[in-house]
Amino acid sequence: MRVCYKHFRGSFKSWQQLFLDATDFATGVGADRLISISHSSDHSDGVVTVWYWGTPERCYKCAYDLTGNESGKCPECGTAV
């Protein structure tokens, strides 16, 4: 597993809505995989980030799609994931 994240951002959404969107996602991730939820701003955008333990979706080396891969290595280039 590795640390993954998902951003929720927008200048047209309120902070409350960004946090609601983030907590809905975090609920789907599950308490056992959730690391934290953080917030910041980027110019006029509010940014809420959910940090969680997950599996990589793409190979670090060749960007091969690893969706559903359970072997622990990339089938395209052999890199351990």
Image (cartoon, rainbow, N blue to C red):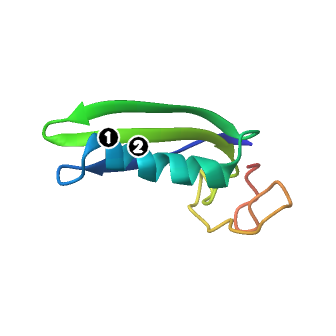
Q: Which residue is mark 1?
A: 47
Quadrant in the picture for residue 51: top right
Across and down, in percent, residue 41 comes to 24, 33
| Circle 2 Cα neighbour tier, 10 Å, few/some/many (<14 / 14–19 / ≥20) | many
Across and down, in percent, residue 54 comes to 68, 47
Quadrant in the picture for residue 39: top left
| Circle 1 Cα neighbour tier, 10 Å, few/some/many (<14 / 14–19 / ≥20) | some
Quadrant in the picture for residue 4: top right
Instruction: Look at the numbered disc 1 and give the secondary structure of its residue.
Output: strand
Return the disc, 1 or 2, that comes first in the chain's sequence.
Answer: 2
Q: Which residue is mark 2?
A: 19
Dot label at residue 72: none
Determine the residue positioned at 20% across, 43% down: 45
Across and down, in percent, residue 10 comes to 24, 51
What amino acid type should be assigned to the residue bearing mark 1?
A: Val
- Residue occupying the far right of the picture: 71
* 8 relative to 43, above or below: below
* 80 relative to 57, above or below: above
Question: What is the tally of numbered marks visible in this picture?
Answer: 2
Of 58 and 44, nearer the camera is 44
What amino acid type should be assigned to the residue bearing mark 2?
A: Phe
Of 38 and 23, nearer the camera is 23
Pointers 1 and 2 in contact (C-beta within 8 Å): no
Say left or right for 38 vs 51.
Answer: left
